[in-house]
Amino acid sequence: MRLLPRSGPIPASSSSKPPPAANLGCFMCVKQTAGCAMTEGEMTPERFAALEPAFLHLEALVLNGIGEPLLNPGLEGFIRRARRSMPAAGWIGFQSNGLLLTDSRAFSLVEAGLDKICISIDAASPETFSKVREGGDLTAIDRAFAALTLARERCNRPEVEVGIEFVAMRSNLGELPAALSWAAQHGASFAIVTHVLPYDELHAVEAAYTSCTDEAIALFNDYKAEAERQGLDLSRCFEARWKYAKNPEEQRIINLVDAMKNEAKRRDIFIDLKKLLQLDRGKMEEVSAVFAEAEAVAREHGLELRLPEVTLRENRRCSFVEEGGAFVSWEGNISPCYFLWHRYSCFASNWQQQVQPKVFGNVEQRGILDIWNDPAFRAFRENVLAYDYPNCSSCSLAPCDYVQTEEFHQDCHIKEVPCGACLWCTGVFQCLR
């Protein structure tokens, strides 16, 4: 569960929906990966009640974890309890695959006070949909939308927002515009598109984002254009660098590369020259073209569309921390963000990375506001917002011993926040917020 605070020193985003068992086999889910050590369970009413002191200040309460929220029979009770305490302007929502959203369940959720629901639709064709979400059926999504439309009418709550989430991958990217059109025609008012987070090398080929930053690519393009103007080939830089006796052309290549590196250092841009030279420009253009078509479809249907970046964003922004977010696991553990709330392994930057959870307390042992205001948690958030940590995804030395370790202690900037290897702040991953 994610909590989003309205004002004051309180959490803004939290994850109270644990990883309850899922009712689909989605290959892009961390629970399907080898070695996943997540323990399944459901948040109890007692643990949820311990969060109540924060509700008065929340802008949003997102009842999500890793699993299907509708499998929790106490979901409506959680919504009612939070709705009684939250500000009128605060909203309660969650993401779902929609399979269990019958007429009666949709009615009970809307009647309880649900404000926003996001249905997962990762394809427009039944064939692709069933491949991405094993056991999934597009007709069930159709029924879910119809049930929500009926529930809004019966409860006289037309303001309840219904939207979709689309996980963009190489294998389903082309179906995004059609999926948006279908959703809009079935009553969706918003759509969230996110890139897939690869959990292993096998699925890394599905990633549709480019693992170089926008500013690094722009800088490289400038120097590549200058090299071409001078009749030089920058791809020969590594060969030329290691030659003892360089001819004039090779020395000019080295000089140009050194000038680029010096400018990157001056502008605080991390560059990995090998990655930049191997950049798949065709993939970038394909993704950009599909996103442009998606924007046109959204404009046509009046759909609020939130797209991810095509390349990593150099100027990172952690919306979880900046907006005052926190995650609450089903066990009651308080963590700062999506990246650090459970133990897992991922392949986001083309190398296997072990991620350890960062926990600042448990609501069964301390009050939620005491944990939020704890000096260690406050210091962590301040360090994140300073953004003085490395950009590991763009570093030619990564993975290094600082981040590729079972127990993170510090990074190469001597900072104790394990955020250098996180891609959430680069704009390629998104969620309901």
Image (cartoon, rainbow, N blue to C red):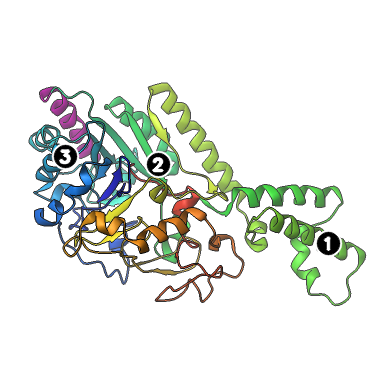
Identify the residue position indicated by label 2 in the image. Answer: 193
Residue 163, percent across and down? 30, 34
Distance in Å between CA atoms under marks 2 and 3: 31 Å
Amino acid carrying label 2: it is Val
Identify the residue position indicated by label 1 in the image. Answer: 255
Residue 109, percent across and down? 13, 37
Amino acid carrying label 3: it is Ser
The reply to whether discs 1 and 2 touch (Cβ–Cβ < 8 Å) is no
Identify the residue position indicated by label 3 in the image. Answer: 85
- Residue 301 appears left or right of 290: left
Q: Which residues are magenta?
A: 138-155
| Relative vertical location of residue 339 with respect to residue 431 in this rendering, above or below | below
Q: Nearer the viewer, mark 1 or mark 2?
A: 1
| Relative vertical location of residue 396 with respect to residue 153 in this rendering, above or below | below
Q: Dot 3 lies on which element?
A: helix
Distance in Å between CA atoms under marks 1 and 2: 42 Å
Asked whether residue 423 is drawn in magenta, I would say: no
Q: At 51% across and 77% down in the image, what residue appears?
A: 401
Asked whether residue 142 is drawn in magenta, I would say: yes
